[in-house]
Image (spheres, grey):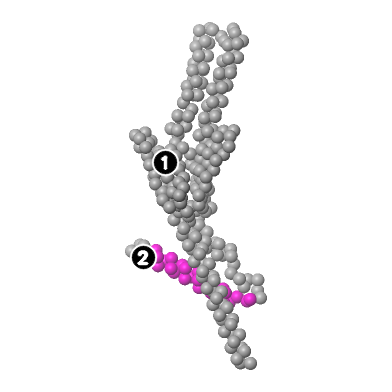
Amino acid sequence: MLVAKDKLSKKLDERKIFEKIVNDTLTADNNSPDSSIDQNDVKDEMDDPYSSSPIITLRTHWIILMKKVLFPTLLLASIILLAGFFAANNQPLNDSSFGVILFGLILIAAFLWWLFQFFDWWNDQYLITSDQVIDVYRRPFGTENRRTAPITNIQSIRFERKGILGLLLNFGTVYIRVGDDELTFNNISNPAKIQERLFGVLERSLSRSKKYETTQQQQNLAEMIDAYHQIKGKKTEDSRN
């Protein structure tokens, strides 16, 4: 029942748009700058509220970050505990300049390692816009790999949670089939929700494209009706003369 009402409402909306196009075309003054249909009005009809929304940015689950920074974090903690041990036992490192330099170098290296792993996680992004999906992978101080696909070319969307950890922490991979290719959003939080969002974006994009095509067809038909009336009026005037 609700589906039938929705279809009827869409037909009524399309008819109103068509009536407005025909009315504007037939009543407009051909010598007036307003004789053509305002393309901004057509664009406003086509605008989807989602298109003005910000880009959805996704990253891998925080557990992936924890795995990446585990060893550098342990190394930093060990260095700090070692320094605390020496200080507590009155064995300062400044007794040996070599020891101080070595300690400082290890500390800096561990910290840089931690930063590298963090930004390696941070730069691995998945973006969803109103018209495309984007997989961005950029190594720190390295090259960037970017894969994109139009939303309207999506054929299927599925997700998978692997292992007990994936089920407990609710993370997994979303697979997006685009033609013969497949984009994957790996190890993201709440993959079922992301699948739902993608289906919503796809539905709105297809609806927007269909509405635009319908309006273009109606505009072309209105122009044909206008041309018919002009030819008919000209023939009537010629016959009177």
Counting from the top left corner in percent of width and height, residue 178 is at: 46, 50
Q: Nearer the viewer, mark 2 or mark 1?
A: 1
Q: Residues within 10 Å of mark 2 (few under 14, many from 20)?
A: few
Q: Amino acid at mark 2?
A: Ala
Q: Are marks 2 and 1 in contact (CB under 8 Å)?
A: no
Task: Tell me the quarter of the image containing the C terminus.
Answer: bottom right
Counting from the top left corner in percent of width and height, residue 23 is at: 54, 75
Q: Residues within 10 Å of mark 1 (few under 14, many from 20)?
A: many
Q: Residue at x 60, y 75 (%)?
A: 28
In the rendered image, is residue 168 in sight?
A: no
In the rendered image, is residue 44 in sight?
A: yes
Counting from the top left corner in percent of width and height, residue 146 is at: 54, 43
| Tag 2 residue | 4
Q: Residue at x 51, y 40 (%)?
A: 125
Q: Residue at x 54, y 77 (%)?
A: 225
184, above or below 9, in the image: above
Badge 2 or badge 1: first in the primary sequence: 2
Q: Amino acid at mark 1?
A: Thr
Q: Which mark is residue 173?
A: 1
Counting from the top left corner in percent of width and height, residue 75 is at: 50, 20
SS for callout 1: strand
SS for callout 2: helix
Is 29 contained in the magenta span? yes
Q: Main secondary structure of the magenta part?
A: helix
Range of the magenta residues? 5-30
135, above or below 228, in the image: above
180, above or below 100, in the image: below
